[in-house]
Amino acid sequence: MPLPPGPTAHPVVQMARWFRNPLPLMDEAHRRFGDAFSLRLAGMPAPLVVVSHPEVIKEVFALGPDQAHAGKANLVLKPFLGVHSLLLLDGAEHLRQRKMMLPAFHGERMHAYGRSMIELAHHSIDRWPIGQKFAVHGPMQEVTLQVIIRTVFGIAEGPRFAELADLLTRTLRVATRPGLLFAFMQRDLGPMSPWGRFKRLAARTSGLLRDEIRSARDKGTAGRNDVLAMMLDARDEAGRPLSEDEIHDELMTLLIAGHETTATSLAWALRWILPDAPLVQRLRQEIAGAGEDPQAIGKLELLDATVKESLRLQPIIPLVARILQEPFEFGGLRLPTGTLVTPSVYLVSRRPSLYPDPERFVPSRFLTFKPAPWEWLPFGGGLRRCIGAAFAMFEMKMVLASVLGRVDARLASDNVRVTRRAITLAPSGGLPVIVTSRRPREAVASRTAA
Ligand code: HEM
């Protein structure tokens, strides 16, 4: 049985459009072909079957570890994260490592990170220029990088951590060049070539991570409650620990997947919040009531709705992928084993039946509408749902509360486009903004206390 229909343009043309900005291509194909269509992208081993009906997505997310694989669909990340990365594993091995990592990102543990998220956000805000245009994506990246380093290693001070932060920033600057995702660009032509530079930076980062793993193992983990210590202590059902290679690749995954994504989502959130003066006003009132208490900020309803709405309107990852390990039937179609099924995060979030007037930024819709996991999927779903979802949303709230509480700012340009940073879709130019005024932190804190 054939795959669902789709655009007939040459695969090279489809890939070029996909690469530039996949959203208009998905919109167009959805308008023409409906809730299931195929895209043929040059360089991909199989066509992508893009699905956007929530009921079909529900079924895709319900597929078991031996029915659909995500790791094989993420192979493009291998040079960046390593073969043992959770994002690249499948089947039993994926479940084993996922179970060992999940506890680090749960409830109470996560709240313990709230204070440092707020501290680091204020430290950044203190240095923002007043009255001058600057790209806010950079500072957001600095904050989220410091947060994840602190979360993973427990502290973020000392020369080793400064070196790690510097290396990761430089590695990402090279690695997020979209062209490097193509195998033909991955050639080491010396230290000045993009891939050569990336390989050298990645090797130095690896060296630091391995030093850190060995030193933590030698010293023991007593009294530590960071993610590295948890990974060293974790045992699977057979009582086996994670190997050094496994821990290394998972650290790399958390450090990279755990900060670039959140920084870009924060930049998008500001893109929608800043021009909406009445919303800023209402958020400020709500935030003032919570002071700097991370738990209280985490529970603010309008802030929560605002974060969810900005992730809906502008998902940074437009689809998630599964490779079928057995045939999958829906809507009269039977997709064969090996098909790449891709629930579209983007198209679901633009369904008027779920989100009336879907192009508009309306945070209040999430005050009353509680979507099912297959109706709002910026973090994917099922067995592969992002393990950092709660952490990322919590961090976004801490940072946005800190920014909005102290800073009056506006976008420097109305023309904000979608640009690609390797895997993620980011606001163009790093989202230039202009801060018009900044209150001292103490003034905000004392007004809250009064
Ligand atoms: C706003 C920020 C973030 C977004 C939008 C995001 C999005 C995603 C998406 C779409 C997936 C794939 C899910 C699927 O295939 O169904 C994913 C997986 C993953 N994310 Fe995130 N993520 C974010 C933040 C984080 C953070 C903070 C961490 C860690 C601290 C993290 C770690 C991971 C890992 C390890 C996986 C692989 C899960 C697995 O395959 O079992 N992410 N994320």
Image: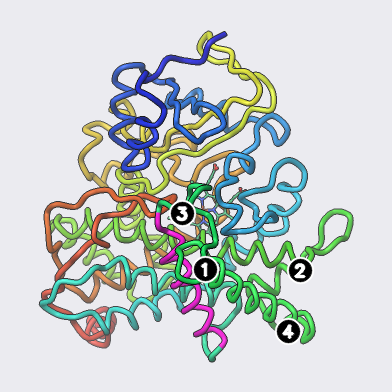
Question: Residue 15 lies in what quarter of the image?
Answer: top left
Q: Residue at x 13, y 76 (%)?
A: 132
Check mark 3 vs ligand 1: CB closer than 8 Å? yes or no: no
Label 2 Cα crowd, 10 Å radius (few <14 / some 14-19 / many 20+): some
Q: CA distance from mark 4 to mark 3?
A: 33 Å
Give the answer, above or below, for where 399 lies relative to 299: below
**Dividing the image into 4 quarters, which one contains the N terminus?**
top right
Between disc 3 and disc 1, whose residue precedes? Answer: 3
Q: Dot 4, crowdedness within 10 Å: few (<14), some or many (≥20)?
A: few
Magenta residues (range): 160-177
Q: Residue at 26%, 46% (x, y): give it.
A: 364
Q: CA distance from mark 1 to mark 2?
A: 29 Å
Give the spatial CA distance, label 4 vs label 2: 12 Å
The residue pinned by badge 3 equals 180
Find residue 324 and report its horizontal and vertical position in percent: 64, 27
How much space separates mark 4 and mark 1, taking CA atoms?
A: 32 Å
> In the rendered structure, which amino acid carries the disc numbered 1?
Gly
Q: Amino acid at mark 4?
A: Ser
* Residue depth check, mark 3 versus mark 2: number of the one nearer the observer: 3
Q: Label 4, on which residue?
A: 215
Label 1 vs 2, first from the N-terminus:
1
Determine whether label 3 and label 1 are within 8 Å by CB: no
Of callouts 4 and 1, the N-terminal one? 1
* Residue topped by disc 1: 190
Chain-order first, disc 4 or disc 3:
3
**Residue 272 appears left or right of 348:** left
| Image location of residue 356, percent across then percent down | 25, 31
* Image height of 370 relative to 112, above or below: above
SS state under label 2: helix
* Secondary structure beneath label 4: helix
Q: Position of residue 178 (x, y in %)?
A: 40, 52
Q: Which mark is residue 244?
A: 2
